[in-house]
Amino acid sequence: MGSPITLHRSSFCKRAGLALASVILTSTHPCVLGHARGAGQHTMRERTVCADNTALVEELRRRGVIQSEKVERGMMSVDRGNFASIPQMAYMDAPSPIGHGATISAPHMHAYCLEALSPWLTPGAKVLDVGSGSGYLAAVMATLVQDRGSKAPGLVIGVEYIPTLVEAALQSAERDPTSRPLLDAGILQLRVGDGWQGWPESAPYDAIHVGAAAATVPQALVRQLAPGGRLVLPVGLDGQEQVLTVVDKDYTGHVKTKGLFSVQYVPLVHRNEA
């Protein structure tokens, strides 16, 4: 793959509160550096923009964000473009609005979270994705835990409190050729619910991911975490410091929490606050 190039002249279009650089992508340079400003942001930021999903994943691997073949395989298998609401941002390494104040997280954040959960994303595992939004990350995780034909075929449940987002996510998954058979097999399930409460009907879970920032670690999710399991979530108030956090539960039920690095996510909303 060619090296990214910096744009010196950009034209901008506005859509859903975004200023987005218009770029020309070539086979020589499948990823370039553009500039975008997200809703609520005042500063244009340099963002990597790629021609397609393959180029995006390869760029994340080149940068060392993706470190394992497993995560690379999962992100290659599900086309992010089938889940993005704004086509111009589908392969940009930036969060993208999907409506109702929600976003599909930046690809590098999806990669970091997948790497943090990778040892737990094994065939037959049960996974909960809280604040599943677009459904993209749930679909990627479903490709990694699927074990069709076995007594434990694997399960990923995405929980989102906004019904219209769940409907859109289901349509996106139906459109994606990798995700559609996982929906049909019941390995990928997208539900309407309060993420703070998790999805106790299918607990315990080997891995839990939260795609929005919680002010504190939701204890309902800790209770639904299986012994030996891992929970990954951003913790912190909206507009203040947030930290990507891992919560590990050992086989005696003891819980250990560790902060990884600072992040910025939209808040995890209680369903009754919507």
Image (spheres, rainbow, N blue to C red):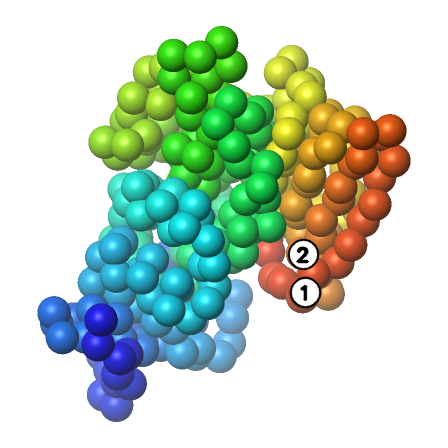
Q: Residue at x 70, y 61 (%)?
A: 260
Q: Percent from the top left, x then y, of residue 33?
A: 31, 78
- In the rendered image, is residue 272 in sight? no
Whether residue 203 is situated above or below residue 37 in the rendered picture:
above
Q: Is residue 72 left or right of residue 211?
A: left
- In the rendered image, is residue 122 in sight? yes
Q: Percent from the top left, x then y, of residue 115?
A: 54, 51
Q: CA distance from mark 2 to mark 1?
A: 6 Å
Q: Earlier in the sequence, mark 2 or mark 1?
A: 2
Q: Quadrant of the N terminus?
A: bottom left
Identity, as a three-letter code, of the amino acid under mark 1: Phe
Mark 2 = which residue? 244
| Contact (Cβ within 8 Å) of mark 2 with mark 1 | yes
Q: Residue furthest bottom?
A: 8
Whether residue 273 is situated above or below residue 55 in the rendered picture:
above
Q: Is residue 231 left or right of residue 6?
A: right
Please give the label number shown on residue 261: 1
